[in-house]
Image (cartoon, coloured by chain):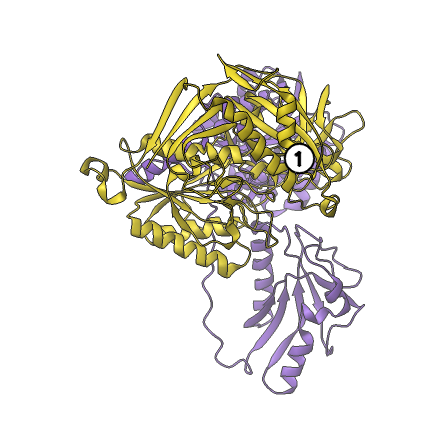
């Protein structure tokens, strides 16, 4: 299975008469793009903005981030089972805009999983999106049933993101990529002796799936991954758009749809394949609610890794708190069957830094990568421009915000928890916790 | 220029040897002994006074010694408190830890000391104060003092402080996030750190976890009681049940105190005479009926049926929420000693 990703490096985004890409310039027909957004009658207001690295702009409440891309070969669309026909995402060719993303932001209303993102100033570096040129959709919906709920499915806005990212990406269809990356793995039993003698490694991904009510969880080919047992996937499926982000994870721990499609841990393993390791593939797991489900999932992951012949596993958890139990359980079960593990997660050490970093601990977890501290306190100075509504951070129950945390002058105190995707458990994080 | 006060024992304070170990606290209005090393290095802070106390006096009259020391410091203007270095000297390490903790609490200034990792004072005080990793013997005095001086100088200058391992002090059980680039480290992404760590782990050599799992202090389960009718048992709880006025002022969270209250002649714990002060669970049920946490009613029933023997006249209680492992272990030891004194052979320990 071969997946090619043709890259187009965006140096400028502008609005123009036609949606097109040439020589690093992405031009967007605003009316046509907004028409794509308004296809959903539940969207009641929509506007588009362009933000660049260093702009003194604050975005909040950010719902999700998307790569603007199109499929030129293989499946018929970029989110199979979600907004595209259900076909394998593992092969074919995708054309994608690089160094750019689409960010979807609520015009007024935020929810538990939404975040705040600064394009300039001291917190620009807290997410990868601060270093990108971003198209920003600010929109409102008529989803009255969840208007004042802390937990929102954000369905209309998230699906608008899917449609819009594909609409923009379509302008790349007939163009020649500036760079082409190609990912291909031989079937497990057809790998050369040279590859087979390298240490065999699986990647175990635990996306957030802990909502029992439909509409919130990570989707795998459009399927609610709460209703899933661990399954074996080709890394190309994830890079190819088989997994889209949900609407439940406190924001610093979130893996955005953009990050699923660009999962850097998968890419690092693919790059190392055949050189320093034999990448066996992905065990797509999940995060569960009750202990029995957690243990069942962990036992099944361990069996799968063991039967695939894994010597080692990298396990990544999208979340903190309760799902730490699933995370540690998987590490323990893998070690039990002789698969050596490295975990990737953030920590929650409390505002004073003195709390136990993970809810569950086990001496078997001897190799852990730390990607940040959920409860680190930060003070944001006022920004000249806020897109969306800053008050959402204080009013709407965003994780990491609270009543009164936004001041009249536009400054705010918050926990890192509210910073959009800032702990990047997908693997992008360039921070970690240290002992003091 | 900021001001520091240095604490030394009788020996390093140039009072005398072991024969002067009962020496009571005194404050010299000048830098004494190794203060000179400190003052030669620090540019932004200077030791101007030296507090000296005999190790024995501090060890055997701790409360009095601390009180005297704090009194001597009252009204003095200082920004940083330094003690030692104490090397691997057990009594001196304890003294440095005790005085640093007390001064830091009372005067709200950072306190810094230095000990060898083998010094019991490290385990006792590392969570409270900065303890630098020092040498084993007094021959290390120059380098140990220099390390403290450099760190005190940094605090005085207001420069950002680095993680414990980079500064050289024992981790205090505090973890914060830091961008790698801010520490002058290569900003390697988590995914690449993970792949590298896994390859090292598979080879079996030198990788360093970024999140060390604290050593778990597992207590072996005691052998089963042969006949519970023939021994004396006691009730112990971390559920925060106390008499209604909470006479010992046990904290509702992060407890450092425990209490012991009579149940002699009681058939059960009645509300509102007893209640919970535990902040970690919904108190409604326990306040209505404290026996749901400390089950005296069930114990008395079993006694009446002849299925239980003697029950201690006191129950023992504290609060488990947010309580550090260190404090919990200390309180556990203290309660256990008391129980043994009273001839108790088994306890029913109720958590929440």
Residue named by callout 1: B104
Of residues A23 and A122, the one nearer the viewer is: A23
Q: Is residue A432 left or right of residue A202?
A: right
**In this picture, residue A147 sits left or right of residue A34:** right
- Residue A215 to residue A379: above or below: below
The image quarter in which residue B154 lies = top right
Number of numbered discs visible in the structure rendering? 1
Q: Which quadrant does the N terminus of chain B fall into?
A: top right
Write the residue at 46% across / 19% down.
A8
Secondary structure beneath dot 1 equals: helix
Tell me the quarter of the picture where residue A102 sits.
top right
Chain at tag 1 = B
Which chain comes out purple in the rendered image?
Answer: B
**Residue B49 shows in the view:** no
Question: At which x and y percent is residue A425?
Answer: 50, 37
Instruction: Give the colour of chain A.
Output: yellow
Q: Position of residue B173 (x, y in %)?
A: 55, 40
In the rendered image, the vertical position of residue A186 relative to residue B79, given as above or below:
below
Identify the residue at image location x=70%, y=45%.
A150
* Near-viewer residue (A195 or B329): A195
Q: Position of residue B43 (x, y in %)?
A: 59, 14
**Counting other residues with Cα less than 10 Å from the Cα at mark 1, is it few (<14), some (14-19), or many (20 or more)?**
some
Of residues B79 and B243, the one nearer the viewer is: B243
- Give the image quarter of residue B247: bottom right
Name the spot of residue A145 as percent of width and height, x first.
Answer: 73, 48
Instruction: State the residue at coordinates (59%, 82%).
Output: B308
Task: Name the outermost residue toward the bottom.
Answer: B305
Can residue B11 be seen here? yes
Taking the view exactly as shown, the residue that stands out farthest to the left is A193
Please identify the quadrant where the C terminus of chain B is shown: bottom right
User: Camera-side residue: B152 or A157?
Assistant: A157
């Amino acid at each position: 299975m071969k997946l090619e990703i043709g890259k187009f490096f965006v140096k400028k985004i502008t609005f123009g008469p036609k949606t097109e890409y040439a020589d690093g310039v992405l031009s967007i027909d605003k009316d046509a793009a907004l028409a794509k957004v308004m296809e959903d009658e539940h969207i009641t207001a929509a506007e588009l903005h362009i933000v660049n690295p260093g702009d003194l702009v604050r975005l909040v409440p950010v719902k999700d981030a998307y790569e603007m891309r199109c499929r030129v070969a293989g499946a018929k669309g970029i989110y199979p089972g979600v907004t595209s026909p259900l076909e394998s995402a593992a092969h074919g060719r995708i054309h994608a805009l690089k160094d750019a993303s689409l960010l979807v932001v609520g015009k007024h209303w935020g929810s538990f999983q939404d975040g705040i993102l600064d394009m300039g100033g001291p917190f620009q570096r807290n997410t990868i999106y601060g270093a990108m040129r971003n198209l920003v959709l600010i929109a409102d919906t008529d989803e009255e049933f969840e208007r004042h709920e802390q937990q929102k499915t954000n369905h209309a806005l998230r699906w608008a993101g899917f449609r819009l990212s594909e609409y923009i990406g379509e302008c790349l269809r007939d163009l020649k990529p500036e760079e082409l990356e190609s990912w291909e793995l031989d079937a497990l039993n057809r790998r050369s002796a040279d590859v087979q003698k390298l240490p065999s490694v699986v990647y175990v991904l635990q996306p957030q799936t802990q909502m029992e009510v439909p509409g919130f969880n990570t989707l795998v080919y459009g399927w609610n991954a709460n209703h899933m047992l661990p399954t074996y996937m080709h890394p190309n499926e994830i890079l190819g758009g088989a997994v889209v982000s949900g609407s439940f994870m406190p924001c610093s721990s979130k893996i955005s749809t953009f990050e699923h499609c660009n999962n850097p841990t998968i890419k690092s393993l693919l790059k190392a394949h055949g050189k320093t390791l034999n990448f066996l593939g992905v065990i797509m797991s999940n995060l569960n609610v009750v202990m029995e489900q957690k243990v069942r999932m962990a036992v099944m992951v361990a069996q799968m890794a063991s039967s695939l012949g894994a010597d080692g596993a990298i396990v990544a958890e999208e979340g903190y708190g309760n799902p730490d139990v699933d995370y540690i359980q998987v590490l323990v079960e893998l070690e039990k069957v002789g698969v050596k593990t490295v975990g990737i997660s953030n920590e929650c050490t409390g505002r004073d830094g003195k709390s136990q970093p993970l809810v569950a601990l086990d001496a078997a977890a001897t190799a852990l990568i730390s990607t940040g501290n959920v409860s680190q306190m930060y003070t944001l100075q006022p920004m000249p421009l806020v897109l969306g509504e800053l008050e959402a951070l204080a009013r709407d129950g965003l994780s990491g915000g609270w009543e009164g945390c936004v001041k009249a002058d536009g400054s705010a105190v918050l926990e890192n928890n509210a910073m959009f995707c800032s702990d990047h458990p997908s693997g992008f994080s360039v921070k970690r916790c240290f002992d003091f | 220029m900021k001001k520091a006060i240095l604490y030394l024992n009788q020996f390093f304070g140039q009072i005398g040897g072991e024969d002067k170990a009962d020496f009571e606290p005194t404050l010299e209005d000048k830098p004494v002994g190794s203060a000179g090393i400190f003052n030669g290095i620090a540019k932004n802070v200077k030791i101007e006074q030296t507090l000296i106390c005999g190790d024995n006096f501090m060890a055997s009259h701790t409360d009095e010694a601390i009180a005297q020391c704090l009194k001597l410091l009252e009204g003095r203007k200082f920004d940083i408190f330094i003690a030692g270095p104490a090397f691997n000297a057990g009594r001196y390490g304890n003294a440095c830890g005790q005085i640093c903790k007390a001064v830091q609490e009372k005067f709200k200034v950072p306190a810094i000391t230095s000990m060898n990792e083998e010094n019991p004072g490290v385990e006792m005080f590392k969570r409270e104060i900065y303890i630098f990793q020092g040498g084993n013997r007094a021959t290390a005095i120059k380098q140990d003092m220099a390390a403290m001086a450099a760190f005190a100088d940094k605090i005085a200058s207001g420069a950002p402080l680095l993680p414990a391992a980079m500064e050289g002090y024992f981790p205090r059980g505090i973890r914060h996030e830091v961008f790698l680039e801010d520490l002058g480290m290569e900003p390697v992404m988590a995914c690449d750190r993970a792949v590298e760590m896994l390859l090292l782990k598979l080879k079996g050599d030198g990788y360093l976890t970024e999140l060390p799992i604290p050593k778990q202090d597992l207590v072996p389960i005691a052998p089963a009681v042969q006949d519970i009718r023939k021994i004396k048992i006691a009730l112990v709880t971390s559920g925060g049940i106390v008499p209604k006025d909470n006479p010992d002022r046990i904290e509702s969270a992060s407890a450092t105190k425990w209490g012991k209250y009579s149940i002699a002649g009681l058939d059960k714990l009645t509300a509102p005479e007893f209640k919970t002060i535990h902040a970690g669970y919904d108190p409604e049920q326990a306040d209505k009926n404290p026996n749901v946490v400390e089950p005296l009613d069930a114990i008395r029933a079993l006694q009446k049926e002849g299925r239980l023997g003697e029950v201690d006249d006191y129950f023992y209680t504290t609060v488990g929420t947010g309580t550090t492992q260190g404090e919990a272990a200390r309180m556990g030891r203290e309660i256990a000693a008391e129980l043994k004194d009273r001839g108790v052979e088994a306890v029913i320990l109720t958590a929440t």
